[in-house]
Image: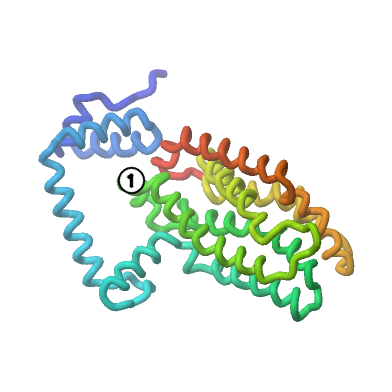
Amino acid sequence: MTAWHVGDELAGRYAAGTAAETDAWSLEKHVESCAHCADRVSAAVRGRGAAAPLLADIRTAVLAVAEAEPVRGAPRLPGPASRLGRVVWAAGPALRGAWAGALLLVALGAVALAYVGGLGGAARPLLLVVAPVLPLAGVGVSYGRHADPMHEIATTTPGGGLRLLLVRTTAVLAVAVPVLTLAGAALPSSAGGPGAVAWLLPGLAMTLGALALGSYVGCRTGASSVAACWAAAVVLPAFGTSPSRIFDAAEPATRYFAGTAAQSGWAAAAVLCAGLLALRRRSFDHLEKS
């Protein structure tokens, strides 16, 4: 059976707004899963200069309404601060959910264990073991049909897809990196142990790996899979001991962070994952199916 694709004539009629409703519906449904036809239709729309003023008018009207009517639940701040607050609110779904609270809880808990619980330098290995997977949780709840009620609309916009995903991932990292790094710096260091920033390259590599894997299976599944692999390889062996030996067991896990060889490996993994993500960038232009 020969697969159906959008022809130039149908793409032109769709761009001109003269296509029959059934033809337009079939085209819109088809381009959700066919990147080649989506490019053809996009080119046809861009080729009609008359559409640009209409799109500009629509954009102006939408921004005017958004400025006049605060988004439900968004912070209400005066003047330019209001617009900035809405941008942050829209760019970071994870920041307004339970993820941000869990992140602060982990950071403050590590500091409390070090100084109030009497762990001292043993608290830093615990934080290092957990820190790389915390951004993954934020990424998993930032993009996709499970996380975003506007996913179907956002995916079809010029600013959707990988661009929106990277914006929301940046918002997650912009919060996670300073919080976890400051918490690590506040902890007492152990002799010869990794520094407070030793988790950054592993965390970046895992985040890029989750995004690259998400291009195949969806962001939530991709982030969960990477986190599960890290937990099976590092976290569970470190914590799967008797409570009295948890902190001693976390110390050997720091070998994944310490040393030039380990950090170089994480850097190479980050570059490879970034390259794969670039190759798979168009996969985010369609709705997630999982």
- What residue sits 47% from the left and 33% below the top? 279
Position of residue 188 in the picture relative to residue 79 (left or right) = right
Quadrant of the rendered image containing residue 50:
top left
* Above/below status of 149 relative to 218: below
* Residue visible at 71% across and 77% down in the picture: 112
Position of 110 with respect to 60 (left or right) is right
Which residue lies most toward the top here?
1
Q: Position of residue 71 (x, y in %)?
A: 32, 70
Q: Position of residue 266 (x, y in %)?
A: 65, 43
User: From this viewpoint, is residue 90 visible?
Assistant: yes
* Left or right of residue 196: residue 39: left
Q: Nearer the viewer, residue 96 or 248?
A: 248
Q: Return the residue found at the far front.
A: 191
Q: Nearer the viewer, residue 248 or 260?
A: 260
* Whole-percent x, y for residue 174 in the image: 49, 60
> What residue is disc 1 on?
156
User: Which residue is more in the foreground, 35 or 206?
Assistant: 206
The quarter of the displayed image where residue 265 is located: top right
Q: Quadrant of residue 22?
A: top left
Classify 127 as above or below 204. below
Q: Amino acid at mark 1?
A: Thr
For residue 223, above or below residue 83: above
- Counting the numbered discs, the total is 1
